[in-house]
Image (spheres, grey):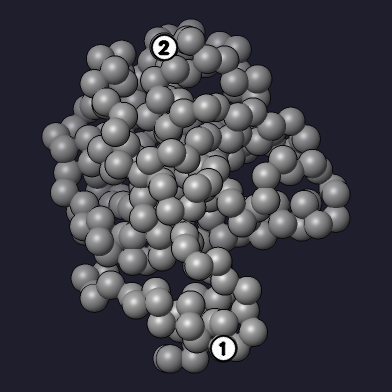
Amino acid sequence: MTDLSALTRICPAPLPAMHIAWEHVESALGMALPADYKQLAEHYGPGAFNSYIHIYHPHGPTEFVNLTGPMPARIRAYLRKDFDQGTHPVPYDPERLFTIGGTDNGEHIFWITDPVDEPDRWRIAVNEARGPQWFTFDGTLVDFLTSVLSGQTQVPQFPRDLLASGPSFTPSRPDLWKPEPIPDQPPVDTAAIRAWGRANGYNIPPRGRIPSEVREAWERHNS
């Protein structure tokens, strides 16, 4: 497990730690989440690092920064199109990329979800906004933020003056988000979704995240 203390030393968390019902978040996503991300989300809440890096949060105030919102699926669809058509080189299978954040300039920050069933081993990738360049960081999300905000790692896509005023975190306006927006409902039986999907001709991996189109089709079938 990544130690959050290195990050909080250089960039103190501005709010008391919050409670997040992770079982509901993971059920909504259909996948387990890295332990370091859970610590990060609980201690920092929704907001932005250096007024530039926005990490998706279960209580993100808008759909553009909400972990369980539509953005990860939308961005994966764009990547799949680029991957299939060769518009821009995508160095990883889009099904193994899950968007976990973005920047004010339009870059996206991804988990490389490999191995799919070992989220604490997921690495980080950053793509170039409106361009072909990719950057890979061999570590967790908290490791990535700590390294970038301490100046140890310079992401080519990020502005050179990112740390001109030092590391900082600005929380989202508290009136824009509720403490528990994740529906309080029983966890979804992912085994049942996989069985239904295979019976209806979908190609579903035996472990890891269930593709969004399968989840949506299953929900329509059972609505």
Q: Nearer the viewer, mark 1 or mark 2?
A: 1
Q: Which residue is mark 2?
A: 150
Residue sitting at 18 percent across and 32 percent down?
A: 15
Q: Does residue 37 appear in this view?
A: yes
Q: Secondary structure at mark 2?
A: loop
Identity, as a three-letter code, of the amino acid under mark 1: Ala
Instruction: State the image coordinates of residue 182 (x, y, percent, origin top left).
Output: 28, 63
Instruction: State the image coordinates of residue 146 (x, y, percent, origin top left).
Output: 39, 20
Q: CA distance from mark 1 to mark 2?
A: 50 Å
Label 2 Cα crowd, 10 Å radius (few <14 / some 14-19 / many 20+):
some
Label 1 Cα crowd, 10 Å radius (few <14 / some 14-19 / many 20+):
few
User: Is 197 above or below relative to 153?
Assistant: below
Residue sitting at 44 percent across and 17 percent down?
A: 147
Residue sitting at 79 percent across and 41 percent down?
A: 89
Quadrant, the N terminus: top left
Q: Quadrant of residue 39?
A: top left
Q: Which residue is mark 1?
A: 199
User: Is 55 above or below relative to 203?
Assistant: above
Question: Which sits earlier in the primary sequence, circle 1 or circle 2?
Answer: 2
Identity, as a three-letter code, of the amino acid under mark 2: Ser
Depth check, front residue: 60 or 81: 81
Q: Quadrant of residue 223?
A: bottom left
User: Is 174 above or below relative to 198?
Assistant: above
Q: Is residue 138 left or right of residue 165?
A: right
Q: Secondary structure at mark 1?
A: helix
Instruction: State the image coordinates of residue 91 (x, y, percent, origin top left).
Output: 72, 40
